[in-house]
């Protein structure tokens, strides 16, 4: 059981994605909990502004420290033990399956999603424990990266996937890409399903899958074999 706490200006984006498909089913079953906290609710002024012009000039706006700090304090009150606060930024350490496996052991995770040109550095210094990027490209905000991370971590939680094996069998866990998959019909557009998969010969099928995984990895992601 893991609890996610997401500090964001767009809570509906977080909730609608997480309440869909497999993560949605896991929430209904009580295997995950998610709360999206609107940073705007913790604004320190009557106009509910959360951003301001950057000192020293430059384009865009910067998210103010105080609303982020207050939202984080409110979340911390609901958590018993100290927990990690992850700030999504292209400047962070690149997210990976092994990082997901580490984070999947936590009971609570706080995600901080920035927008505009970023967040006042001073509040980051006080609350952030991990700076994480999902890849070398720039998105408009941290919500999609937080969702990518939560989706990856969620499928590693006990009971979230129906077939208990699929979490360990997938690509990357053994540094190989997955073999190709087929379902009915047996012939489609004159292409036949590989004969061995219809043979019922479990050992041969396992060998074929491993060989296909190796071939595919060699062809598409030789860096994974290195
Ligand atoms: N915010 C904007 N781009 C991002 C990225 N690539 N990873 C994490 N957070 C981001």
Image (tube, grey):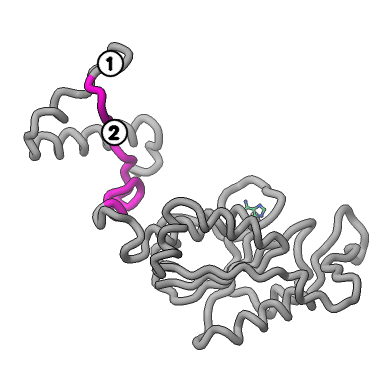
**Which residue is drawn at the image coordinates 39% and 63% (left, top)?**
101
Q: Is residue 219 left or right of residue 83?
A: left
Asked if residue 31 is among those painted magenta in the image, a careful observer would answer no
**Which residue is drawn at the image coordinates 70% and 73% (left, top)?**
124
Q: Is residue 148 left or right of residue 158?
A: right
**Which residue is drawn at the image coordinates 52% and 79% (left, top)?**
83
Query: Can you give x and y, in whole percent of width and height, for residue 194 in the image?
Result: 20, 24
Q: Quadrant of the C terminus?
A: top left
Q: Nearer the viewer, residue 223 or 101?
A: 101
Count up the numbered dots: 2
Secondary structure mostly seen in magenta is loop
- Which numbered marker is on residue 181? 2
Residue range in magenta is 166-186
- Which numbered marker is on residue 15? none
In the displayed orientation, state which residue is furthest to the top. Answer: 190
Query: Can you give x and y, in whole percent of width and height, for residue 24 in the image?
Result: 46, 58
Is the C-beta of the residue carrying label 2 under 8 Å from the nearest atom of ligand 1?
no
- Which numbered marker is on residue 191? 1
Query: Can you give x and y, in whole percent of width and height, for residue 134 in the image?
Result: 56, 53
| Ligand 1 quadrant assignment | bottom right
């Amino acid at each position: 059981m893991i609890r996610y706490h997401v500090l964001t200006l767009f809570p509906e984006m977080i909730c609608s994605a997480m309440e869909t498909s497999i993560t949605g089913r896991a929430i209904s079953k009580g295997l995950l909990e998610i709360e999206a906290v609107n940073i705007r609710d913790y604004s320190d002024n009557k106009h509910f502004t959360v951003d301001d012009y950057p000192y020293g000039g430059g384009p865009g706006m910067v998210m103010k420290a105080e609303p982020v700090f207050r939202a984080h304090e409110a979340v911390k009150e609901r958590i018993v033990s100290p927990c990690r606060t992850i700030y999504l930024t292209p400047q962070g350490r690149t997210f990976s399956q092994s990082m997901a496996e580490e984070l999947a052991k936590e009971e609570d995770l706080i995600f901080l999603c920035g927008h505009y040109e970023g967040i006042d550095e001073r509040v980051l210094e006080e609350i952030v424990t991990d700076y994480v990027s999902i890849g070398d490209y720039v998105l408009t905000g941290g919500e999609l990266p937080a969702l990518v991370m939560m989706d990856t971590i969620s499928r590693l939680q006990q009971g979230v996937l129906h077939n208990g094996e699929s979490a360990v069998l997938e690509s990357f866990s053994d540094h190989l890409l997955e073999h190709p998959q087929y379902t009915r019909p047996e012939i489609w557009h004159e292409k036949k399903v590989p004969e061995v998969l219809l043979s019922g010969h479990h050992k041969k099928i396992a060998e074929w899958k491993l060989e296909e995984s190796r071939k595919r990895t060699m062809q598409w992601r030789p860096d994974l074999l290195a």
